[in-house]
Image (cartoon, grey):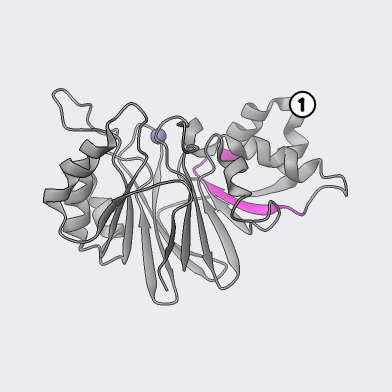
C-alpha cells in the first residue's frame, strides 16, 4: 500500500499545500481520501486525472470535499465525452450538497460523473481495500478510516476532537495519519479538532507504529506542533507535507 499526501493544509489551503487529500494505492487501485480545495491540481503530479478508481469523503466541510466540483468539470466536459462515473462514498446528503456547491445548472455533471454511496460505520470492500469507518467527534457527520491491504494498515482521523472511536480505528495500524489542528492553549473548543499532544496520545493509545500529523493550519508554528506531540508518542513521528510518499509495503 502506497500513501501519497496530496494536500495536508488544515481548514483552508496554505502556500505549500492544498487542503486535505490523500492518495492510497494498492494492487493498481487508486483511492482518494478527501478532495479538499486546491487538491485536484496537485493530484495531477502523482496520478493521471482519469486514473482514480474511487473517492471517500470524510465529511462535507469545504476543505475536505470542494474540489469534487472541479473534478466533475474535468470528467464531464472531457473533449472525448464524459468519462465513466466512479464511486464517491460520503456522509448522508453528499450528492445534494455537492450539486448545491456546483450550482443546480451543473447537476448533470455531478450526477453523471459520480456514483454516490452513503457511508455508515462498518466495513466495506473498495477494490482491493478493506475500509472500516467510524464516526468522529466533529460538528458535522464525519468518518474516520481504517484501510487494510496486503497485510498493512493505514488509519486516517479526518477531523475530530478527542475520540475513542479513533483509537479503535487506529488500533495496531502501521501508520496513523492524524489531524493536529490546534496547539495547546487555554479555552480550546471541544468536539472540533485535536491538539498535537492529543493526536500523539491517541496514536500511543492505539499502539500505532508510526504517526504523521496532518491538517496543519497555516497560522500555526509547525515546529511547535512537532514539539508538543513528541513527548507523547515514542514511535516515528513527522509532519505531513504535500508530495510526501510513504510505502507501507
Ligand atoms: Zn471539518
Tell whether 34 sits left or right of 201: right
Residue drawn at the location 82% of the way across and 45% of the way down? 78
Ligand 1 near label 1 (Cβ, under 8 Å)?
no
Tell whether 135 sits left or right of 199: right
Ligand 1 resides in the quarter of the picture at: top left
Tell whether 154 sits left or right of 54: left
Q: Which residue is mark 1?
A: 105
Which region shows up in magenta? 84-95
Could one spot residue 194 in this view of the protein?
no
- Where is residue 177 drawn, in percent x and y? 34, 53
Q: Is residue 152 above or below residue 144?
A: below
Label 1's element? Answer: helix
Residue at the far bottom in the pictured view: 151
Q: Nearer the viewer, residue 216 or 195?
A: 216
Give the quarter of the figure containing the C terminus.
bottom left
Residue drawn at the location 73% of the way across and 33% of the way down? 107
Residue drawn at the location 52% of the way across and 38% of the way down? 36
Q: Which of the 4 quarters of the picture holds residue 174? A: bottom left
Tell whether 115 sits left or right of 189: right
Amino acid at each position: 500500500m502506497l500513501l501519497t499526501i496530496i494536500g495536508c493544509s488544515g481548514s483552508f489551503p496554505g502556500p505549500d499545500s492544498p487542503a486535505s487529500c490523500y492518495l492510497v494505492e494498492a494492487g493498481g487501485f487508486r483511492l482518494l481520501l478527501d478532495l479538499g480545495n486546491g487538491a485536484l491540481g496537485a493530484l495531477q503530479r502523482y496520478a493521471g486525472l482519469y486514473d482514480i478508481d474511487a473517492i471517500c469523503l470524510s465529511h462535507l466541510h469545504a476543505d475536505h470535499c470542494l474540489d469534487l466540483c472541479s473534478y466533475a468539470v474535468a470528467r464531464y466536459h472531457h473533449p472525448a465525452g464524459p468519462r465513466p462515473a466512479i464511486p464517491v462514498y460520503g456522509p448522508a446528503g453528499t450528492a445534494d450538497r455537492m450539486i448545491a456547491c456546483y450550482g443546480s445548472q451543473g447537476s448533470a455533471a455531478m450526477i453523471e460523473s459520480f456514483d454516490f454511496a452513503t457511508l455508515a460505520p462498518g466495513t466495506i470492500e473498495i477494490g482491493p481495500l478493506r475500509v472500516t469507518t467510524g464516526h468522529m467527534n466533529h460538528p458535522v457527520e464525519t468518518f474516520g478510516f481504517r484501510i487494510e491491504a496486503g497485510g498493512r494498515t493505514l488509519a486516517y482521523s479526518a477531523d475530530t476532537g478527542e475520540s475513542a472511536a479513533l483509537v479503535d480505528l487506529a488500533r495496531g495500524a502501521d501508520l496513523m495519519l492524524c489531524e493536529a489542528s490546534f496547539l495547546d492553549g487555554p479555552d480550546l473548543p471541544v468536539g472540533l479538532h485535536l491538539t498535537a499532544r492529543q493526536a500523539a496520545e491517541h496514536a500511543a493509545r492505539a499502539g500505532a507504529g508510526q504517526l504523521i500529523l496532518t491538517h496543519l493550519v497555516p497560522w500555526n508554528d509547525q515546529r511547535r506542533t512537532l514539539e508538543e506531540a513528541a513527548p507523547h508518542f515514542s514511535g516515528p513521528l513527522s509532519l505531513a507535507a504535500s508530495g510526501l510518499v510513504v510505502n507501507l509495503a
